[in-house]
Image (cartoon, grey):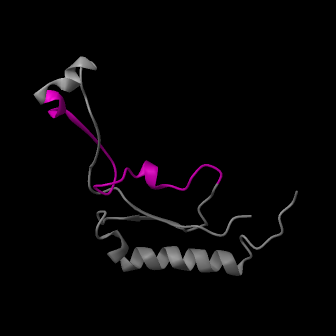
Amino acid sequence: RSPPAAVLYGKSVPTLYGARVSSREAIKHQDAYDDLAFAAGDGVCLASAAMLPAGYRVIRNGLVKSDRGHVGLLGDLEGVGQCLRAVIRGRKEGVGLGSLQK
């Protein structure tokens, strides 16, 4: 029912997602942010958080990994082109054009 969707994401720059502290009380101390936790992402967003919401699916060949960071992600013209080709192909194949069933 939904239109075709593609995702261009990066995992090459570690993304900060939290700080390890021993307790809630330790958050108040100056050294609370000395032990930072990083995960795969593009430097700003976690790769796992950049995916489509639950209930939506990425069109075939529309999940494209880039080696770019957050600011340069859309500058990956090859990756953007692959996403666009997948979305256009999906639409030509009728993805998202069907009637809604009640």
43 relative position to 4: left or right: left
Q: Is 46 covered by the magenta stretch?
A: yes
Q: Residue furthest left?
A: 30
Q: Residue furthest right?
A: 102
Q: Is residue 37 above or below residue 14?
A: above
The x, y position of residue 76, in whole percent, is 35, 75
Most frequent secondary structure within the magenta stretch: loop
Q: Is 35 covered by the magenta stretch?
A: yes
Instruction: State the residue at coordinates (52%, 78%).
Output: 84
62 relative position to 11: left or right: right
The x, y position of residue 33, in whole percent, is 18, 33
Image quarter for residue 66? bottom left
Q: Which residues lie in the magenta part? A: 31-55
Instruction: State the residue at coordinates (59%, 62%).
Output: 58
Instruction: State the residue at coordinates (55%, 68%).
Output: 61
Classify the position of the N terminus by image quarter: bottom right
29 relative position to 78: left or right: left
The x, y position of residue 96, in whole percent, is 72, 70
Classify the position of the C terminus by image quarter: bottom right
The x, y position of residue 41, in whole percent, is 34, 53
Count of residue discs: 0
Image quarter for residue 31? top left
Q: Is residue 15 above or below residue 1?
A: above
